[in-house]
Image: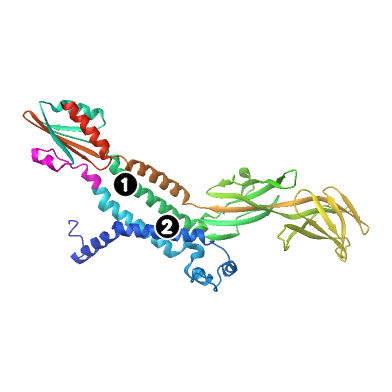
Amino acid sequence: MTAVESWPSPFLKKTFFSVIKIVADLRLAIILLLLIALLSVSGTVIEQGESQSFYQQNYPESPALFGFLTWKVILLVGLNHVYSTAWFLSILVLFAMSLTACTFTRQIPALKATQTWSYYRQPRQFQKLAFSTQITDSKIEPLNQFLEKNGYKTHQDQNSFYAHKGILGKVGPIIVHIGMLVTIAGAIVGTLTGFVAQEMIPSGSTFQVKNVFKSGAFSASHLPQDWSVKVNRFWIDYSPNGNINQFYSDLSVVDEQGQELDRKTIRVNEPLRHKGVTFYQTNWGISGVKIQLNNSPVFQLPMAPLKLENKAELWGTWIPTKTDLSEGISLIAKDLQGTVVIYDGEGRLVSAMREGMILPFNGVNVKLIELVGSTGLQIKADPGVPLVYLGFALLMGGVVMSYLSYSQIWALQEGDFIYIGGKTNRSQVAFEREFLELLEQGK
């Protein structure tokens, strides 16, 4: 059965090729590309992944931004998560289909055309070429040698001659299309299978990734299941004036038996990567304080962040000084440098303490052992990143290849005359110069 006979009906065949023609239209591809660019700009300008209250505050209904853009419109259309909406992914898929159709209907046939050439047997055939002339008292052999020296692939059949070079210039557009398709595939894979999580983990604790706030439809398979992360230690380097220079987290990846699989000390812009999951250092806090009362065992009390109008960061806790919890002191800290401030039950300042100091209060010796820091981690997995990198590499390589000129030269010897002609798809001036040098060789 032939390919034509395999079609269910002539109508379906005609419809199929009509759709292919529409999808492969360059104008459609340009419109889709501009639309993708416009939507990407909106995803950059409008904050992504924020809470509803954030959009209500920043995009009120009156006055509406540009007269129509309100928080309701943003949430309804999905402009708060542009890149993961069904309509944005559909546009990417349609653009990919347009590129694929264009590749098979235009670029590949253009490449095949470079392999189907014929010798010119009649002088009149040279008249249609962009560059053509005739010379006398010459031979084809010197022309052949000159062209081979300049990178041409030559063919000769009796008194006819053909040469061409720059076939990579025809391959370049195909590589560009493949690169764009791979990049689009990477973006879609990343959107559907990636996730972003945030964790605030006390120093010395072990955790699994749970607090996921952004995920794709198929991201569950990429969440760590058989390994965890232990925060061996968290610390901050301070400058002499008390400002933070850098904060660090010593992390270990451990299996279900607690065996260490990987370890790295991370800091800002230097993350830990393990099995496609990346752990970034993004924040810090004070999770607790270790205290000893008289000769009691050392125990750890949690510390909570305190909300202040000037947005200053403070952490506080309450330490009981009586067994019935009827009295106690408040402990306030602003950093991990080891200094805290103590207030009594009436809110009066009692004293300042450093780690290792003892404060007598209500007949109890309160010893400050240590402030326990917590590390803020942002955890990301994007399986589409390798595809995106590969796509960009192909795209850049294809663009460079596309700048190569595809040049063709024919020659025909009839008696004492040699008819020479040629054409190129770009770099006309350089080709004209090369063509003139070729004529000099024939004289």
Q: Which mark is residue 37?
A: 2
Question: 289 left or right of 216?
Answer: right
Residue 129 place in picture, x, y as percent: 16, 41
On whether residue 119 falls in the magenta region, the answer is: yes
Residue 65 place in picture, x, y as percent: 51, 68
Q: What amino acid type is highlighted by mark number 2? A: Ala
Residue at 31% in and 46% down: 173
Quarter holding residue 22: bottom left
Task: Report the quarter where the N terminus lies.
Answer: bottom left
Q: Which residue lies furthest to the right in this view?
A: 363
Question: 76 left or right of 352?
Answer: left
On screen, 302 above or below 247?
below
**Residue toward you, 226 or 242:** 242
Q: Which residue lies furthest to the bottom in this view?
A: 62
Q: Which mark is residue 147?
A: none
Residue at 63% in and 56% down: 199
Residue 70 place in picture, x, y as percent: 52, 70
Question: 438 left or right of 221?
Answer: left
Separation of marks 2 and 1 at Cα, in angstroms: 21 Å
Residue 42 place in picture, x, y as percent: 48, 61
Please give the count of numbered marks on the rendered protein: 2
Q: What amino acid type is highlighted by mark number 1? A: Pro
Q: Is residue 234 visible?
A: no
Judging from the image, the colouring scheme is rainbow
**Residue toward you, 435 or 107:** 435
Q: Is residue 36 visible?
A: yes
Task: Report the quarter where the C terminus lies.
Answer: top left
Query: Which range is magenta?
Result: 110-129
Sequence-wise first label, 2 or 1: 2
Give the secondary structure at mark 1.
Answer: helix
Task: Please name the residue that numbered disc 1 is placed on.
Answer: 173
